[in-house]
Image: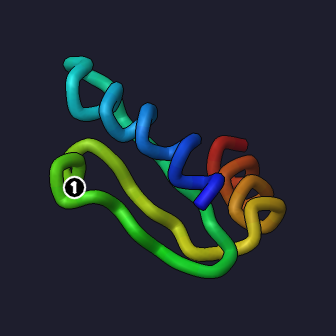
Amino acid sequence: MTPMFIQEPFWALTNNLPGAYDVMVNRDYQFLPQQIEDKGVAIKGDIAKVLKDVRQQLN
């Protein structure tokens, strides 16, 4: 339950702020609330690997 207390405020901010975009990384599941489907992305994977891949793409 604890992750929901952290995620829900960010989902609400993303939904309400123009130009906001939410990127979520989780090892076990890939979930993006329907109300922000066009304003975010959910990535299922190890965050260390995801960040390494992002760094490689940026270089």
Q: Is residue 21 left or right of residue 25?
A: left
Eyeballing the image, is 28 above or below 48? below
Location of residue 46 in the rendering, given as x and y in whole percent from the top left corner:
75, 71
Quarter of the image for the N terminus: give it: bottom right
Eyeballing the image, is 28 above or below 46? below
Residue at the extreme top: 18
Residue visible at 26% across and 22% down? 19
Q: Is residue 6 left or right of residue 17?
A: right
Q: Quadrant of residue 29?
A: bottom right
Protein image colouring: rainbow
Q: Is residue 44 left or right of residue 14?
A: right
Residue at the extreme front: 1
Q: Is residue 32 left or right of residue 9?
A: left
Which residue, given by chain and number where applicable, does mark 1 sit on? Answer: 37
Location of residue 39 in the rendering, given as x and y in whole percent from the top left corner:
26, 43
Residue at the extreme bottom: 28
Eyeballing the image, is 32 above or below 8? below
* Amino acid at dot 1: Glu
Eyeballing the image, is 8 above or below 12? below
Toward the viewer: 48 or 9?
9
For mark 1, give the secondary structure: helix
**Label 1 crowd bin: few (<14), some (14–19), many (20+), radius 10 Å:** some
